[in-house]
Image: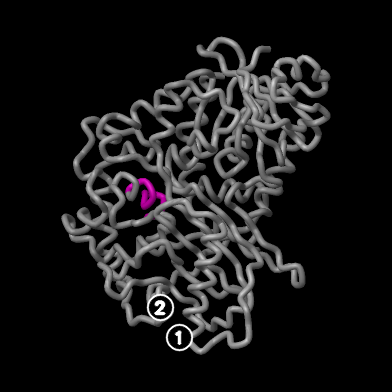
């Protein structure tokens, strides 16, 4: 069992072993006990939305799995905060789902109730979060929005291949490389812009993003929700779903666990070997196939034995920043939504908040940035923006807003340049599926939308993996 040797700048404690800088990993592996070796059909790296769903579905098909998750819970960005005094829960990440069979079947099997999310088209209060001032901004009426969505759907339907990942047709259509700004002018979709900005959060600056990525996010699944209603959990607790999924998959879930190293065959002959640090020491996983779901950026895939081809592709990605927070003591008495008074279509410049929403006496803030920011920078800016609103509205005198929860969803919305798209980046990326007994899923391979990702798993990822197994 030979692994790629890693050089460490310091010594590490790994399980019950003291790993010196010059200690070969295969030496440690040879000392593992038989009980520290896990053999499965599939090892899944990442227990977020895609990883958990795929694990459940592989189990449905009689395949053995083990999930490696760095956090202490499954669900990835589906974080839930529980008020310690009342027990009331607030979802701080994934909140809404499309009313499609894939979604309702998944929640039903775990007996987690869904309810329609009230749709708010009119009556929103907008604010300029750079000054704290309330703005007189009129959203498009329901009738106008319905009409513009019909025009948008006509354009989206030209690219059915986009419903299964980035399965592009070459040469790439020039419209897919237009910015959202130019596209809405070309096809008279201006009334869609503010709605897209507020509902398709995390894409920044949205007017400058290529239509390929807009079509991926504002996709057919999203349009179903636009035209009817989003669904949300009845008890405002996404961890109810993922907790039950963890119970189903137990004991094949390794939480608070990270990759130390891995060895994947250069061909599809042989098995994948992954050395994992868990709270109970090192574990060696031997599997027929590996499914990787974290954002495919070299700095994220620590411990991976990336090939030159994989590294060359993954390093081309750039990402947006997306964050959410829950605060108390803000004094806000109304939910506020971001707008820019002097900006095209009233879309404000980011980084900054998308909204400051009231929720059970607390304030929930959603925040976006064209680039990934430090948590400290985001928190500082959120507090500064809240103070501006307080000053303008005469609120919060003698009170200091405090964070009760903060969630970092970055890196978000992985993208590459138009030149890379034009030159076949996604065609090359797709060829990685199945190479070295490795498959990929997650937002970078389809879209930032759990509903669409679960359907993508059933329609594309799962059949591909089952055929290989």
Depicted 257 relative to depicted 286: above or below: below
**In the image shown, does 237 or 200 lie closer to the viewer?**
200
> In terms of secondary structure, where does tag 1 sit?
helix
Residue 358 or residue 221, whichever sits in front: 358
**Does the rendering let one see residue 15?**
yes
Residue at x-position 64% and y-position 63%: 405
* Residue 372, percent from left and from top: 47, 51
Percent across and percent down for residue 341 are 30, 75
Badge 2 is on which residue?
131
Tell me which label, 1 or 2, sits earlier in the chain: 2
In the image, residue 222 lies in the stretch drawn in magenta: yes
Span colored in magenta: 215-223
State the predominant SS element of the stretch in magenta: helix
Residue at image mark 1: 392
- The location of residue 466, given as percent across then percent down, is 54, 24
Image quarter of residue 308: top left
In the rendered image, residue 397 lying in the magenta stretch gets the answer: no
Question: What kind of element bears circle 2?
Answer: loop
Q: Quadrant of the C terminus?
A: top right
Q: Residue 453: x and y, percent?
A: 48, 43
Residue 234 image-quadrant placement = bottom right
């Amino acid at each position: 069992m030979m692994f790629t040797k890693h050089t460490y700048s310091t010594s590490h404690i790994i399980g019950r072993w003291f790993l010196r800088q010059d200690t070969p990993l295969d030496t440690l592996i040879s000392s593992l006990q038989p009980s520290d070796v896990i053999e499965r059909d599939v090892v899944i790296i990442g227990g977020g939305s895609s990883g958990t769903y795929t694990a459940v579905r592989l189990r449905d098909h009689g395949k053995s799995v083990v999930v490696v998750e760095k956090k202490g819970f499954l669900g990835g960005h589906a974080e839930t905060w529980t008020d310690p005094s009342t027990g009331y829960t607030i979802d701080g990440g994934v909140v809404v789902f499309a009313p499609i069979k894939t979604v309702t079947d998944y929640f039903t099997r775990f007996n987690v109730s869904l309810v329609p999310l009230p749709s708010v088209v009119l009556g929103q209060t907008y604010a300029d979060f750079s000054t704290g001032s309330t703005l007189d901004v009129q959203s498009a009426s329901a009738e106008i929005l319905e009409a513009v969505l019909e025009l948008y759907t006509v354009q989206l339907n030209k690219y059915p291949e986009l419903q299964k990942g980035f399965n592009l047709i070459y040469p790439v259509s020039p419209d897919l490389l237009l910015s959202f700004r130019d596209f809405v002018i070309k096809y008279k979709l201006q009334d869609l812009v503010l709605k897209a900005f507020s509902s398709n959060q995390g894409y920044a600056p949205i007017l400058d993003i290529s239509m390929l990525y807009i079509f991926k996010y504002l996709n057919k699944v999203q349009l179903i929700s636009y035209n009817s209603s989003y669904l949300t959990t009845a008890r405002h607790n996404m961890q109810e779903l993922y907790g039950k999924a963890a119970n189903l998959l137990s004991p094949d879930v390794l939480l608070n666990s990270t990759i130390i190293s891995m060895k994947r065959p250069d061909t599809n002959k042989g098995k994948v070997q992954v050395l994992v640090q868990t709270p109970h020491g090192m574990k060696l996983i031997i599997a027929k196939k590996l499914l990787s779901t974290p954002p495919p950026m070299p700095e994220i895939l620590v411990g991976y034995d990336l090939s030159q081809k994989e590294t060359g592709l993954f390093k081309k990605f750039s990402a947006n920043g997306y964050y959410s927070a829950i605060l108390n003591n803000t004094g806000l008495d109304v939910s506020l939504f971001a707008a820019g008074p002097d900006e095209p279509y009233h879309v404000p410049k980011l980084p900054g908040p998308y909204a400051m929403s009231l929720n059970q006496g607390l304030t929930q803030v959603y925040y976006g940035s064209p680039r990934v920011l430090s948590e400290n920078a985001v928190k500082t800016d959120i507090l500064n923006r809240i103070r501006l609103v307080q000053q303008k509205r005469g609120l919060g005198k003698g009170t200091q807003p405090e964070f009760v929860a903060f969630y970092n969803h970055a890196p978000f919305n992985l993208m590459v340049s138009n030149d890379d798209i034009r030159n076949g980046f996604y065609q090359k990326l797709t060829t990685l599926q199945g190479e070295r007994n490795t498959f990929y899923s997650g937002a970078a391979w389809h879209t930032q939308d759990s509903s669409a990702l679960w359907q993508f798993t059933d329609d594309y990822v799962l059949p591909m993996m089952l055929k290989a197994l």
